[in-house]
């Protein structure tokens, strides 16, 4: 375990570009035979009723690329969108008790603090430096939790400063772990705090198919839980390939937005059984948006979801679990919600009534967009309405980042509602933080 006050690792800057996209594995070469055409819409679509394009407002001092030319986004009618601040590769966010916005920047080892100043540019400062790929941020009262690549820390937050660093969970696997020898595709970790004070954090898988993660110590591809009074972290949910999106719902339940596997083989009997087919891979398996309970199993890498968008059953992965001996997929409860395969959901948060209807209560998900699919799955900020302890189907809240030819000017990471009732969005491709404002 390291000292409680973290230090900076220069090598992380080189590795960050590979892990920030969510899935860093190189794709296998798929078969060219296809059993059926792909049916899921993937490119930028015409705005839905009640939505339309708006010009992204940019201050004169923020017009570096990609804002050196006009940009348009698709937002609900009457809403506006502006570039609020710019910083290198911003990721996850948390609003502090003093009304300031904290943003993690894994590539520089920093947590940056922004003080809103009305219509003027926010005041920017570095809250913490010399961290190891800080990613997840969460508050429990005035206690700030930060998930680094190899540990979760707690700090006392007061007067715009974080002090009294202590390790909540240490010795976590990352690309410096001796047994991994630098091979870690999902090194970034996220953190959330339950209503009882328990701390939850994600540990991603080391690769696309790396079954040894399930028996590692500590296990990888898991959501871990630290009891409210402290103590060793224990697995809370397993088979979670890359649960970067981690948040607590209005009823206190923990939810995860999970990146599924790539290049899954065709599972149905017939001549295509067991082959990696582009049309099937392009739409399978759906990305999971799941409610977590103690002992929840999300299947990876032995079981994959099919169907959608809601109540998705599991089927055996024919490459890793052809006879069901590794895991009984039929026994797993269906997953509550989903989004299209390879969407790469990253940040997850819940609205709290400060947005106008129909967005007052629900989940916001930063959809990074696919890296390995043709045509590409488009980046956006998605909204899932909160209904009776569950989530309704996916809707687009903010889109327009991808053109019809698949080119992009931005890739949202996370979205959170601010004290002012606006939605703040990080974009690590455009190096921007947006403010999207209702009427």
Image (cartoon, rainbow, N blue to C red):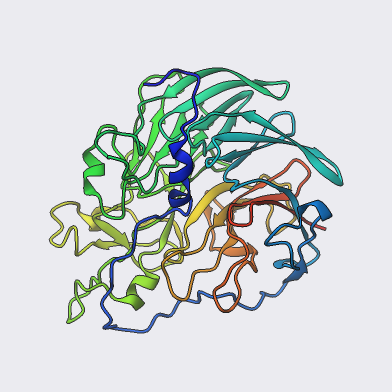
Pick the front one: 136 or 177:
177
**x and y percentages locating residue 254 in the rendered image:** 48, 41
Can the viewer see residue 418 in this picture?
Answer: yes
Residue at figure coordinates x 64%, y 23% from the top left:
142
Residue found at x 46% / y 32%: 9
Left or right: 366 as drawn, with respect to 98: left
Asked whether residue 296 appears in the rendered view, the answer is no
Nearer to me, 394 or 116: 116
Residue 33 place in picture, x, y as percent: 26, 83
Relative side of 225 to 239, left or right? right
Percent position of residue 415, x then y: 63, 50
Vertical placement of residue 299 versus 198, above or below: below
On the image, the x and y values in percent for residue 406 come to: 54, 74
Residue lying at 54% horizontally and 48% vertically, measured from the top left: 348
Is 277 on the left or on the right of 377, as rendered?
A: left
Residue occupying the far right of the picture:
119
């Amino acid at each position: 375990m390291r000292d409680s006050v973290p230090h900076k690792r220069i090598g992380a800057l080189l590795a960050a570009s590979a892990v920030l996209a969510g899935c860093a594995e190189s794709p296998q070469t798929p078969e060219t035979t296809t059993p059926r055409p792909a049916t899921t819409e993937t490119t930028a679509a015409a705005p839905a009723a009640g939505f339309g394009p708006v010009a992204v407002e940019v201050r004169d001092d923020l017009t570096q690329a990609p804002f050196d030319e006009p940009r348009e986004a698709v937002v609900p009618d009457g809403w506006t969108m502006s570039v609020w601040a710019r910083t290198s590769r911003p990721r996850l966010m948390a609003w502090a008790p003093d009304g300031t916005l904290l943003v993690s920047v894994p590539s520089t080892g920093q947590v940056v603090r922004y003080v809103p100043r009305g219509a003027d540019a926010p005041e920017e400062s570095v809250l913490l430096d010399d961290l190891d790929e800080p990613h997840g941020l969460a508050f429990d009262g005035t206690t700030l939790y930060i998930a680094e690549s190899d540990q979760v820390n707690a700090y006392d937050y007061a007067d715009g400063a974080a002090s009294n660093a202590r390790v909540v969970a240490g010795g976590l696997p990352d690309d410096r772990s001796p047994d991994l020898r630098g091979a870690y595709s999902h090194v970034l970790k996220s953190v959330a705090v339950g209503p009882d004070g328990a701390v939850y954090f994600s540990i991603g898988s080391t690769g696309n198919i790396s079954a040894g993660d399930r028996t590692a110590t500590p296990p990888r591809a898991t959501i871990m839980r630290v009891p409210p009074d402290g103590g060793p972290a224990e697995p809370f949910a397993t088979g979670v390939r890359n649960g970067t999106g981690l948040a607590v719902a209005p009823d206190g339940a923990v939810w995860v937005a999970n990146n599924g596997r790539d290049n899954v083989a065709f599972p149905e009997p017939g001549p295509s059984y067991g082959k990696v087919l582009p049309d099937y891979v392009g739409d399978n398996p759906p990305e999971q948006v799941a409610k977590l309970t103690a002992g929840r199993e999300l299947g990876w890498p032995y079981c994959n979801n099919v169907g959608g968008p809601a109540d998705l059953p599991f089927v055996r992965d024919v490459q890793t679990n052809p006879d069901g001996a590794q895991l009984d997929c039929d026994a797993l409860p269906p997953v509550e919600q989903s989004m299209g395969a390879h969407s790469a959901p990253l940040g997850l948060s819940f609205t709290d009534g400060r947005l106008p209807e129909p967005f007052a209560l629900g989940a916001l998900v930063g959809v990074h967009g696919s890296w390995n699919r043709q045509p590409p799955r488009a980046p956006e900020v998605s909204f899932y309405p909160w209904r009776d302890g569950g989530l309704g189907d996916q809707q687009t809240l903010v889109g327009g980042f991808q053109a019809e030819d698949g080119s992009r000017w931005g890739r949202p990471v996370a979205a959170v509602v601010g004290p002012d009732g606006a939605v703040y969005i990080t974009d690590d491709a455009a190096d921007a933080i947006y403010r999207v404002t209702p009427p």
